[in-house]
Amino acid sequence: MASFYAAIGFILPFLLAIALPQSTGSPAVAPSTTGSLSIEDACKQTAKLYDLCMATLSPDRSSLTADAVGLTRAAILAVQKNASETATYLTNIDEDDNFNKTAQLQQCLEDCGERYEAAVEQLADATIALDMGAYDESQVLVSAGQAEVKLCQKGCQDSPEHQSILMARNTEVDQLCNITLAIAKLIPR
Ligand SMILES: *[C@@H]1O[C@H](CO)[C@@H](O)[C@H](O)[C@H]1NC(C)=O
Ligand SMILES: *[C@@H]1O[C@H](CO)[C@@H](O)[C@H](O)[C@H]1NC(C)=O
Ligand SMILES: *[C@@H]1O[C@H](CO)[C@@H](O)[C@H](O)[C@H]1NC(C)=O
């Protein structure tokens, strides 16, 4: 919790001062925006990622009648959940002594674990920013989380085992961040 608030305090000090106390309620209480937006129309904005977008947002029934803010919120939560699963997975294999790791792979897994944890915090902060109506800040935070995962990918490129362990997961988070950012652009300003 301490580092969670520290992260917000670091990135959003002014927002923390004005609006954090009202940001903890769960459904989106963002300032109202115009009209509803169908999942299909929103996902069309994601071009080649349409199928993944539909698969990611459709099962979330709360997003069925959402507006652009609600769909962006559902997308952020989906990528946060995905990144969080990988953070847990990395901690587990890091601590698994039956998994024979080279020193290089060990280092790569530890670095990526830290990057994924940072990404999860940034995505949590992105939802808080969105709920406060700070749409630009929210997008910056999604991009920051996406950048962490790109750095994990880059830092481990020379580790041959990395390919099988992390590449698909890194790509998926990258795609989900792209989907989130494309939908966030639909929020009327
Ligand atoms: C998220 O991550 C998992 C790996 O934990 C992956 O299998 C899954 O397909 C990913 N995608 C979505 C949209 O949840
Ligand atoms: C782990 O890998 C090292 C180096 O490749 C090897 O010498 C060792 O026998 C392996 N240990 C196990 C338990 O497989
Ligand atoms: C995400 O978007 C960036 C910028 O448009 C693009 O370069 C990258 O290839 C995209 N990633 C995926 C996995 O689609």
Image: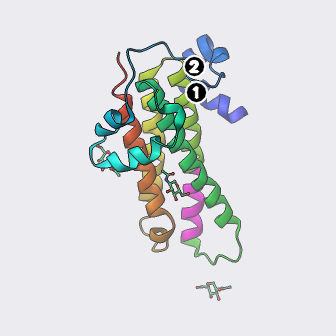
Q: Identity of the amino acid at label 2? A: Pro
Residue 78: horizontal and vertical position, in percent?
Answer: 52, 42
Q: Residue furthest left?
A: 47
First to last magenta residue range: 105-114
Determine if the magenta segment contains residue 107. Answer: yes
| Nearer to us in this view, 113 or 55 | 55
Q: Residue at x 52, y 39 (%)?
A: 60
- Does the beta carbon of the residue at mark 1 sit less than 8 Å from ligand 3? no
Residue 52 vertical placement versus 137 (above, below): below
Q: Quadrant of the C terminus?
A: top left
Residue 26: horizontal and vertical position, in percent?
Answer: 63, 25
Badge 1: how crowded within 10 Å, few (<14), some, or many (20+)? few
Marks 2/1 in contact by CB < 8 Å: the verdict is yes
Provide the residue designation for mark 2.
Answer: 13
Residue 92: assigned label = none
Q: Identity of the amino acid at label 1? A: Phe
Q: Residue at x 54, y 29 (%)?
A: 127
Q: From the viewer's perspective, is 149 left or right of 43?
A: right
| Nearer to us in this view, 163 or 64 | 64
Q: In the picture, residue 94 is in which quadrant?
A: bottom right
Magenta span main SS: helix
Provide the residue designation for mark 1.
Answer: 10
Determine if the magenta segment contains residue 4. Answer: no
